[in-house]
Amino acid sequence: MARFAGGKAPFLRQTDEKDYGTHVIMKDFIIALLPVILFAWYKNGIQVYMDGNITFLEMLYPLFFIMMGGILSSLMEGIFFFVTDKEHQSFHDISQKLSLSFAAIPGIILALLLPLYTPIWVLIFAAFVATIIGKMIFGGFGHNIFNPALLGYAVVGFTLMGVINNAGGLFNASEVLVDSYAGATPLGVLESSKQISYDLLVKPYGTLYDFFIGTIPGAMGETGALAILFGGLYLVIKKIIKWYTPVVYVGTVFVLSWIIGALSGDSGLWFPTYSILSGGVMFAAVFMATEPVTTPTNVIGKVFFALFLGVFTVLFRFVGNLPEGVGTSLIFMNIFTLPIDKFTAVIRTKRFTKPGGLYFGILTGLLILLTVYTIVKAGNMYTIYLPFLGWVI
Amino acid sequence: MKKYLKNNYAVLTLSLLIVLIFIFGGMFSRYMTNQIDVHAEAEELRVFNESLIALAGMGDEVVVFEVEQLTKEYLLPESKTETYQPELLNAYKILENDEEVVVIYVISTNGKFAGLEVAYAIDIETKTLIDIKVMNSNETPNYYVALDEAFFGQLSNKTFDDAVFTIDAVSGSTYSSKAFETGMKYARELFARDFSFEIPYIVYTINWIERNYDSATFLTKPFIANITYGAENNVLEAYFDNKYNLVEVISGVEPDQTYKDLFKNDFPKTSFIDVKTFITAYDETLRLITIETIAYGGKAVIVEFELNATLDQVVAMSITTTQSYDSDYNEGYSGGAVPSVENAYRDQYLLDGSYLDSISGATITSNAMKRIFTLMDNVLTEWGGN
């Protein structure tokens, strides 16, 4: 049963029941994040320590960093509550509000999105952007337009990535020793080479199995696809998220990548698999594209949202300046959550009669146009096959 | 103040926590960043140590061996009189199961240029130079490349008990060759000091060297030398070939191979006679005598002389040469192309038997011609009237 109604009244109120309500949802969210957090710690801390490449103290840093993300966003929200509510300024009041606001979650997700060697002051800045600007200014939990963690990540990504790279970037102490990585992530190689080649994109990092497990370079929480799947499975079983949102999103990226690969002369399934296992696609699919506040609430809306998200992810990956397209596309799609929700709610109720059919046609048409544009603009790898489209667009 | 604190303790506490995270978390993240360099250095050291163990071919641990320089001067490669001090850059011991098995000295010597840094790995038990590894070189690549596998092969498994502790230089890369030899010798001196090793020392003296002018034998035995050697001061007189190998004992007891190697090594260093110029052919019927010497770039100049019937005068000569002087490359040279220098010497010699002064910019070729004529004149003097 849906926790957030998108249909017609009357609605059945369930939040008073023991096993329902936002606190349960957020608790389950944290439980689902646990495998990801543990894998991030294992990959960037424990394993590297076992390799003998870092000290015990360094081994603790990934966990410390993720914890700091959660603590910082809670502290900032607490201060915001204190400043904005003159009536309730005691510790008790603030902590009660924090427990209802699930303040730690954006910070934890934010820390998982950032590279291991992000300086703490950058994390503080990112947590400020995420919590205060991305969440509290809009009215707090349930009112934000953008995914708070993603907003913090995006602002830092566009402004302070140089600082992060100077501080060490995202390669852990074991990864920097691997010559074949040559200081680049799998997506970084695609961005710089613009070539679809297994030997170039996958082989230096092992096999696609390594991509699936997550033992490849990347931000703290984004590489562990298997751990993310465990978390996603838990959320689906607990009915916190709908299975089709991540499936449609990942499927869109997969199919589009396969088409792009095929047009470039390599129709193997390795490239679409590489595409969904690189960068933050899996993490975003499970933990951000399903976020109840900043994504559509009805079924059709979720599907359209995921479809557009997938197309934009591929588009930004191939035409953007940054190798990763997930964050940008999600922020971008957050803007359209409300219209999509409205349009699709009409489609859902009116079916294909006017104006439902019109809305459906507009959304589908936009999607098709965007898909074609994405395929054509996906680089100069295959324009020999589509010279006329390359010329037109 | 109290009231302010009471009213604002919550926000102050939260802010203080953020400041604490900023300070201590910042220290932690700064520590993480600093550790990158620490790990990079450790990794570099690990790779370096592994390369030392690979060089030694044994052992499982590398420790720094704290030793001081040893004062010992060696001849500069390009000089017969000027000396320099090789520099001990680093020393390491390779341990195997905590036992010292190999010592490695990293020594800087002079080749064509200063700064040929080479690691010499020495087996402590067998007192053998196991192998070497070039760590840094400023040598001219075109010349350095001439040092081939055969050359470096001389520097592996070379026992320190060898009294004649030398290696054969590679033609065209003589200076670099000497740099390796000097480093090898200096490494042995260091090893002798640090591990109480006694360097084999043999007493001998080359009393004199003369040229053999006997036309029946001078091709195979061009030199006669008188040498005193050994603890019992054995006096040896023997023939040597043009590679300075002892080929026949004239009088005295034939020495063992160690002495022979030593003679061979020191023969060209003596100044009794010119040992770089040889008679390489003699046709008694036609009275043709061929003399060869090593000139510029290690290349030979060969002159065939035709003598008169009384064997006391040259009547004609032909020259074979591959010298490379020209006005573009030899500063100060303004003459014609090869073999104009050789021809000028020939013409003057045939004219009145005298030698031209050295021609500027082609000094080595000039000296080579003079050496050939000197030997020819000596032959004529020895044979004249016979």
Image (spheres, rainbow, N blue to C red):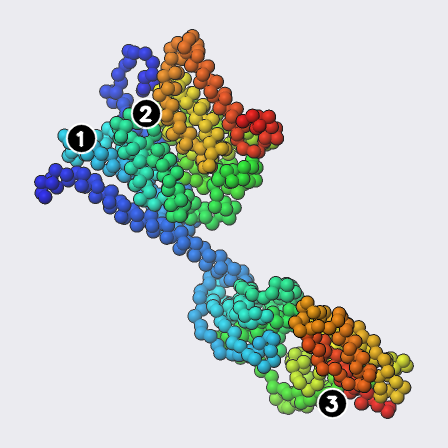
Disc 1 vs disc 3: which is toward the camera? 1
Confirm whether residue A34 shows in the render.
no
Residues at discs 1 and 3 both on one chain: no
Q: Name the residue under label 1.
A: A85
Q: Which quadrant would the N terminus of chain B be assigned to in this image? A: top left
- Measuring 31% from the left and 34% from the top, which residue is drawn there? A130
Residue nearer the viewer, A55 or A311: A311
Residue A15 in picture, x, y percent from top left: 25, 20
Left or right of A150 in this view: B306: right
Secondary structure beneath label 3: strand
Left or right of B81 in this view: A109: left
Q: Which residue lies furthest to the top in this view?
A: A353
Assess disc 3: are there few (<14), some (14-19) or many (≥20) residues with their C-alpha within 10 Å of its C-alpha.
Answer: few
Residue B368 in picture, x, y percent from top left: 73, 78
Q: Which amino acid does label 1 sit on?
A: Asp
Question: Which numbered disc covers residue A293?
Answer: 2
Disc 2 vs disc 3: which is toward the camera? 2
- Measuring 84% from the left and 86% from the top, which residue is drawn there? B313
Residue nearer the viewer, B325 or B286: B325
Question: Which numbered disc covers residue A273?
Answer: none
Q: Which amino acid does label 2 sit on?
A: Val
Mark 2–mark 3 distance (CA, rounded to whole Å):
111 Å
Left or right of B275 in this view: A150: left
